[in-house]
Amino acid sequence: MASRLLHRLRHALAGEGSGAGGPEAEEFPESSELEDDTDGLSTRFSGTLSFTSNEEEEEGSEGLPEAMGVAENGDQSPSPAEHQGSNLLPRQLQDFWRRSCSSLVPQRLLFEVTSASVVSEHSSKYVLYTIYLICSGQFDKTPATIVRRYSDFERLNRRLRRQFSCDMASVSFPRKRLRRNFTAETIAKRSRAFEQFLAHLHSITEIRRSSDFLEFFFLGDLQAAQRLTCTGMYREALATWSNAYRLQDKLGVCNSGRFLLTLAGLAVCHQELDELSEAHCYCEQALQLLEAQESHPLLEPFLQAHIHLSWKVGKDKRQSEARLQMLQETGVTLQQPPTLKEFLIKETLD
């Protein structure tokens, strides 16, 4: 299987290197490759991860991905939202959230590179890796997706080594080499190295909980979803908010401020698209997370939205009305609190 994949990759990339001309060295990290067959592959994780994007894994620990694709035309890979679509039901998302919140043991994640696309733009050339986050031990129908390039991984590696020098000492990362750029062998080896790199990081408790590690996965989605929401592209924003939801769910950070902002984005987009029942569900989920809070900046906007949506869809709104009245009587609320949409637009994500 490995020989068949490498043959296909070589054929796909043949056109990339034939007309390049000039020296092969470039100033971009993506133009570098691994120095040998084992560089960047962790002994600890050797053979534990699969390359294949099929539902059933191929036999053999060193198998290469049968379905790993390299774009021939150099176009950028689709965004995570385009991979997953925007039709995931809110009830399904809430089921994932409840399961993760009730679990005492963090779910083990698999990080699987499903495709790699060579991108050429202006004077630069790099490889985009599409990676699925999949819960192990079960058939995961809704893997979350990220698309990253070598420089993104290198930046994460550099930041984590500054913060966790001892823990990172045993973590392997693919080194750079300025020759034979964008070969099939390099892309295949680097893809497996990135799978193992992420799995090793996720296995270390302190790193798994660090903001740099977590935001490597979902901060870009949150920023993109916010921009789309601000420009009125609600359907596109909804798909990106949904992928950010799945990423945070699988990473076990469903009680953070970022997650509440994600719920606000989902509620706003569903409401703008006249999908009121779905918007109501996300408001309810947020209020469950805010049950013990009395002064959170999103509490009153979610209460106001829940009351309005409950009236629209014919649900009981008395509990939210009582809670909002109590906040107003205690003077906790602002004179002119922002709506969910206003809060979403003004929030700074960096």
Image (cartoon, grey):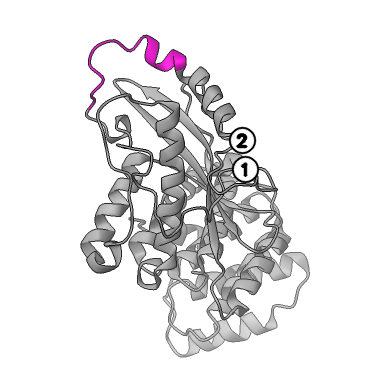
Question: Is residue 291 visible to the viewer in this orientation of the structure?
Answer: yes
Residue at image location 61% in from the left, 35% down from the top: 66
Task: Say few, some or many: other residues with alpha carbon within 10 Å of mark 1 (under 14 / 14 to 19 / 20 or more).
Answer: some
The quadrant in which the N terminus is found is top right
Q: Is residue 331 above or below residue 7?
A: below
Nearer the observer, 255 or 19: 19
Looking at this view, name the residue that lies furthest to the front: 60
Residue 68, how many percent across, how many down?
56, 35
Residue at image location 35% in from the left, 72% down from the top: 206
Residue 107, how many percent across, how many down?
57, 69
Our reading of the magenta stretch's main secondary structure is loop
Looking at this view, name the residue that lies furthest to the right: 314
Q: Is residue 158 above or below residue 299?
A: above
- Range drawn in magenta: 14-26
Per the image, label 1 sits on a secondary structure element best described as: loop
Q: How many marks on residues? A: 2
The residue singled out by tag 2 in the image is: 66
Nearer the observer, 117 or 285: 117
The residue singled out by tag 1 in the image is: 53
Of marks 1 and 2, which one's residue comes earlier in the chain? 1
Per the image, label 2 sits on a secondary structure element best described as: loop
**Viewer-nearest of labels 1 and 2?**
2
Residue at image location 38% in from the left, 22% down from the top: 120
